[in-house]
Amino acid sequence: MMTSIQGFSTVYENVGLYRFYLLFRPIVVLTAPETAEQILKDSSNIEKGCFYDLLRPWLRTGLLTSSGPKWRSRRKLLTPAFHFRILEDFMVIFNEQSMLMADLLARDCGAKPIEISKRVTKCTLDIICETAMGVEIKAQENSNSSYVRAVYSLGASFSQRCIRPWQWLSSIYPLTPEGRKYQKDLATLHAFTEEVINERKKHRGEFLVTEGPRTADDCVIGIKRRRAFLDLLLARHSENGELSLLDIQEEVDTFMFEGHDTTAMGISWCLYLIGQDLDVQRKIHEELDSVFGFDRHRFATSNDLSRLKYLECCLKEAQRLFPSVPFIARELQRDIHIGQYTIPRGTTCLVNIFHIHRNKKHFPNPEMFDPDRFHPENSVARHPYAFIPFSAGSRNCIGQKFAQLEEKVILANLLRRFEIRSMLPRDKLLLVGEMVVRSHNGLMVRIRER
């Protein structure tokens, strides 16, 4: 058995772990890069924790919730779908939806403060629907659609269920009022994705086409076809039967679950922090103007993004302070030894990313928003597990390049047009660690066109 832990503070300082009980289940929390590394780099410990079982009615056994041989084969199968050349095809969608958000925000310039995370979430939901499924749901213009409501409602239901152990039993939860609402929302979501998949399968090969060249890259190709992730999965289904239609639905639902809320909060926290620091914002505007000139409406290209070094530092620093996913869980498949402690097989370990990113040894003055931390010369000697916003090891986020590209496009297109001022000081924020890190009282900002 694990050596007895006598005190939280002693263990936290010397080892970077502590234990607590959730009912009768022991949970070990890892709070330092050195201890997290022991779990995340171990290829034998890739099983997700028990909390992920609550997602199975929604995602079934897609990439996020599957394990063992199925996860390994599915990961290998899906990795090519996130190749940079494929992601570049989505640049037009990133640009179109972020420009639409900017136009909608422009209507509110000079008016009352805006809760920015809600606006950004609608934008990223539009993006993930078009890139994952090839359909437009127009969440930014019509947030009352049944699918949009179901997505938001399911996320809230899952967060509440995680902290209510009496709702964990799958035989009881559907009988509760919350469970019945969850089942109704789930039916709405699954019916939508199933309909899209069947319709897309009928018309496989007929891809959406751009109205004409939109960027310098497009001009080289002429007219660029848009292929959604769904099209790539259907190709596997048709060509060699590697994926059944149910397999495809699992992965599409997983992309939808993982691909909008996390990126939305990453962008929102970055905007909030930039709105708190006018000197940082001035440097960003100078960099953007040096790359784009004074054209506020030109689509961003991959070449543009590669030149936005300071904006990238700001995004990473925002992800350090407010990682979209505050913790990840693993269920140990073998005993792990950390210092004087043995953590036995079967234990659920929580990697506390929020705490790890505030480790004073690796990030002096950790509560300060300082993008310069991520200049290359300041990052050379940093522990590789000190900054893990997309997890780490073999089970890291498969969509991190997609997310990084999307976030940079949206931030660049918004900050080229607007100055932003955050209304709430950080000590007034009420942080909530749900599926993603949120502010319970919102992220209120005031914007004006530059």
Image (spheres, grey):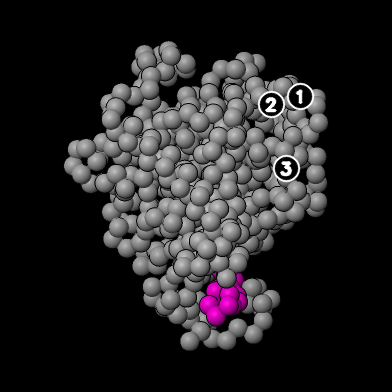
Q: CA distance from mark 2 to mark 1?
A: 7 Å
Where is residue 148, by image quadrant? top right
> Dot 3 lies on which element?
loop
Query: Mark 3 sits on what residue?
Result: 443
Where is residue 450, by image quadrant? top right
Q: Which disc, if any, is residue 105?
A: 2
Q: Is residue 256 left or right of residue 413?
A: left
Specify few, some or many for label 3: CA neighbours under 10 Å numbering under 14, 14-19, or 20 or more. Answer: many
Q: CA distance from mark 3 to mark 1?
A: 16 Å
The reply to whether dot 2 and dot 1 touch (C-beta < 8 Å) is yes
Look at the picture and state if 126 lies above or below 14.
above
Q: Of the two numbered discs 3 and 1 on the same chain, state the one appearing first in sequence.
A: 1
Residue visible at 18% across and 42% down in the picture: 240
- What residue range appears in magenta? 15-31
Query: Mark 1 sits on what residue?
Result: 109
Specify few, some or many for label 2: CA neighbours under 10 Å numbering under 14, 14-19, or 20 or more. Answer: some
Q: CA distance from mark 2 to mark 3?
A: 15 Å
Q: Is residue 412 left or right of residue 241?
A: right
The amino acid pointed to by label 3 is Leu
> Dot 1 lies on which element?
loop
Give the prevailing secondary structure in the magenta stretch.
strand
Specify few, some or many for label 1: CA neighbours under 10 Å numbering under 14, 14-19, or 20 or more. Answer: some
The reply to whether dot 2 and dot 3 touch (C-beta < 8 Å) is no
